[in-house]
Image: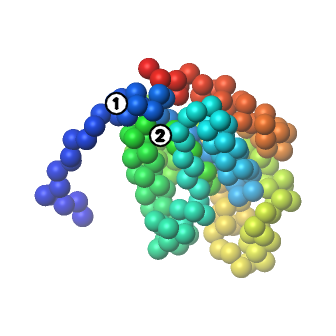
Amino acid sequence: MKQDNIYPVATMPRRKREELLGQRALMIWFTGLSGSGKSTVALALERELHERGRICRVLDGDNIRSGINNNLGFSTEDRMENIRRIAEVAKLFVDTGVITVAAFISPTCSMRELARDIIGADDFFEVYVSTPIEVCEQRDVKGLYKKARAGLIKEFTGVNSAFEPPRNPSLVIDTSSMSLDRCVEVIMQAIGERIEKR
């Protein structure tokens, strides 16, 4: 229930923080199946941005679920709340002038639309990592597909829970046909002008 006695506090304008950092903030949201390469590309992008003198922060599913969202399960309701909290945290980073990179399965269009609405459409750059499930399952980095196929994990995206591809992503990459360096290069080309200081 929303409380009546909460009043927003006017803090330093975002543009002032961006001027200080010498960059423009952006939310780069990676979505795709487990094992598609979201986190690998996100971390490589963070390194590239850092080498170019940009302040960047990666938010990853495992890290978030071991901290701020450690009380959430994997029901549809909990997954929606997981994304809502992540988006609220990401919005704070973006408002601080930080280039923010999120790597989350976020399997439904409604989840990603919620994140976009919270963060703001102008600041939301969606990258669909469209690596085929056959490749993701062959990688099975964490052994999750094997457990899901054995019935040990319920509601696992791609096995017994659907993944809804983005309707109109900002960019599509496929780590089964693109090298890691090429993925980062393509993303940097796409976001280059958007993160340059005003």
Mark 2, secondary structure of its residue: loop
Q: Disc 2 residue type?
A: Val
The coloring applied to the image is rainbow
Residue 124 seen in the current view: no
Structural crowding at the residue carrying mark 2, measured as other residues with C-alpha within 10 Å and reported as few (<14), some (14–19) or many (≥20) = many
At x 63% / y 69%, what residue is drawn?
Answer: 155
Q: Which quarter of the image is occupied by the N terminus?
A: bottom left
For marks 1 and 2, the one nearer the N-term is 1
Residue 60 seen in the current view: yes
The percent coordinates of residue 54 (x first, y second) are 56, 35
The percent coordinates of residue 173 (x first, y second) are 73, 38
At x 57% / y 62%, what residue is drawn?
Answer: 63
At x 39% / y 47%, what residue is drawn?
Answer: 92
Structural crowding at the residue carrying mark 1, measured as other residues with C-alpha within 10 Å and reported as few (<14), some (14–19) or many (≥20) = few
Q: Is residue 68 left or right of residue 49?
A: left
Q: Is residue 148 left or right of residue 42?
A: right
Q: Is residue 194 left or right of residue 14?
A: right
The percent coordinates of residue 188 (x first, y second) are 66, 30
> Would you name the residue on which mark 2 appears?
98
Nearer to the camera, 67 or 83: 67
> Would you name the residue on which mark 1 appears?
16
